[in-house]
Each structure stands twice: as structure tokens, then as C-alpha cells.
Image (tube, rainbow, N blue to C red):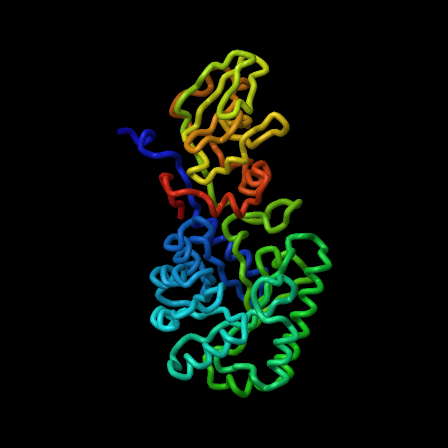
Amino acid sequence: MSRLASQAARLTLDLGALAANWCKLNALNAPGVAGAVIKADAYGLGIENAAPALHKAGCRTFFVAHLSEGIRARAALPDGEIFVLNGLAAGQLAAYRAHRLAPVLGTMSEITAWQAFRDEEPEAERAALHVDTGMNRLGLRPDAFRDLLAAGEMPWDDISIMMSHFVSAEVENDTFTARQATVFGELATLVQEAGKAVQQLANSNQPLRLSLCNSSGHFTESAGRYALSRPGYALYGGNPTPGRKNPMRSVVRLEAPVIQITPVPAGETVGYNSNFIAMRDSLIATISCGYADGYSRNAGAKPDRAGGYAIVAGRECPIAGNVSMDLITVDITHLPKGSVKVGDFATLIGDGLDIDRVGEAAKTIGYEILTSLGRRYERVFVE
């Protein structure tokens, strides 16, 4: 069986570009450093692939969403810090200790549980504390955090990071971002003024660090700069500055082979639900990729709106009708005769079709496109 017949499509992952993106963001957070968010299987690249490449580039602090991801990350990262963003998994305290993982605590009950656990297991990692400055999703509210400080109950010995998360840092001159940064700055001042941090952490290997910036925060003046940033999307080539030129290098390229070329007479339809009607005698290329591979079904064209594009023979060609589970049909009528043949590769992500543009065409965001990329691809890694 030929390679084209055995693989749905080819996904090229540029680990060199991933490392370069981290280096850029790390420099932007100076004098602090950048960590790396590798949740959602490193945004689809694979934790086992991305984490070592980022570590080699100099990253030492990593963030995952779930305990299971943390265990995978530790297997790929013999050293370095790994924080579990979604809190303390019930009944799994021993797993955090065994794999040297640190939870991100967001409730008083989690704080109490981790304090008690570290009293019994002092070698367990110090946690991060999430303070909610406006997302209303995870974390202690600012007033609860202030009460914790005022009561002298801040668990200094058990916390290594105080963090919060932006709501809309990608929006230029966003007032909500400025307000969140102000609240976080005020809380940071209270922590410093408490005076206990320096004294109680004097014998610790690592003082309390502050962390606020996500990917877009690196490019937002009002976000401020702290000891540690937590970029995610931008590492993988997503644009952290929507509406402006993408400052990041592209990491992902998706190509799929043309497996059939079909002449379609004017007036006939293509695909499920007849959402494409040939307005002229047309030529349709069928590409071996579909929504089962993570390419959004919503990228298909409908009578009332255009869909996405593929690049075939160096030119953009519109998707014709619905994206199917395993196939995409593309209108190549405008290409020079004979310029496309079965076995040629069409580009679905890459060149002028970056993940943000593909997401926009599918009425979603590049994040969803990136993290949905499937497992049937031939994966090619570029160093």
C-alpha cells in the first residue's frame, strides 16, 4: 500500500519555530522569564514532542490542565516545574507527590488540603495560588485573598506562585485588561507589604513569584511584567495580536493529497445537503482530509456564505460544499488546465492560511482548530 493510501494527510510540526517563539516571548517578559502552557496535549503538537523542545530552548516552568497531563509531562521532563491549572484532583494527593507536580489552588478548601498534605509530605512541591481578577471561572476572589492576608493565614511555606488570568488581553487598549492589571498590582503590593514572605521563605529555594501575562499580555503595555509569564497559543504560532501582523513563527502545516478530480456540469451539486451548486462547468478536487481529522465541518461553504480555502498548485481554491468526515471538496475550476493531478498535496493550514484565518473561515477560533487536529496524520517533525 502506498504512503498516500495509508495516511489521511500530512501534519508538519516545526519544533524549531516552537522554540524560537518561546525565546521571543521570554525576551519580552524580561526581566522575568516565560513559562510554557502545554495543556491540551501541547495544543495538539503532543506533550512528548513539545515539552522537550521547549526545555531545550531554556523553559523551566510548565503548565498543564489536568493531573493526567502532568504525569505525561513529567515523563517527558525529568526536571523543571509542572503546575496543574485545574486545581487539586480529589483523592489524588499522592500522585502529585510521586510525579513532583504542583497544583494551582483556587479555593480555601484546596489551600487547607494542600497545607495539611505538605505537613505530612514536606518534600511535595509548593503550589501556585490563583486569584481571580475578573474571569469568574477559577480562583479566589480578591476580597477573600485580602482576608487571607489580613488574618495572617497566607500559607507562605506552601505557595511558590501567585497568579491570575486575563479575560481579553488580545483586545488592543482594552479597559478590562487594564483594570485586571491594576487589581493584581494592588494585591501584589499587599503581599510585599505583608513582610512575611521574605522572612518565612528565607530558607526556601524559591521565593514567591508573581505571574499574570498570557500570550497576548506580552504585547499589551498595560499588562505589566512580572517574574513569570504563561504563554500558550502564541508558542504554537497563533496570533496574540489580532488585527495586526502575527509576530510569531508558524509551527503547524497541514497538507492532504488530492485523491480524485471530478468534472461537474453547471447546475449540479457537490457534497452533502447540496450546499454547493456549480454555476458553470466546474472541476472539483477531492482531498483526503475531513472533520474526523479535526478540520472543522463549519469550514464548508453554504449558499448564504463562503467557507474556507485550500491552496492547490500555489493558488487559493474555495471549499465547495460541506466538509465531510474524511473528505473535502475544493473548486479548482480557475486553475490552469493540467496544473493539478491526483497525488498532489493541497495545503489546508500553512502559507497564507494560518490557523487564525482557518478558524475565522470556520466561524470559530484558531485555538479550536489547533487543538482539534486529529491522530490519523502522518506527523513530520522539523527541528
Depth check, front residue: 123 or 139: 139
**Horizontal and vertical percent position of residue 118:** 42, 80
**Horizontal and vertical percent position of residue 245:** 63, 44
Residue closest to the far left: 1
In the image, what residue occupies the spot 66% across and 45% down? 243
**Horizontal and vertical percent position of residue 360:** 59, 39
In the image, what residue occupies the spot 51% across and 71% down? 105
- Residue 107, compared with residue 382, is above or below; it is below
Report the label total: 0
In the image, what residue occupies the spot 58% across and 59% down? 214
81 vs 361, left or right, is left
- Residue 122, compared with residue 353, is above or below; it is below
In the image, what residue occupies the spot 38% across and 83% down? 120
Depth check, front residue: 55 or 165: 165
**Horizontal and vertical percent position of residue 313:** 48, 25
Residue closest to the far bottom: 199
168 vs 349, left or right, is right
Image quarter (top left, top right, bottom left or bottom right) of the N terminus: top left
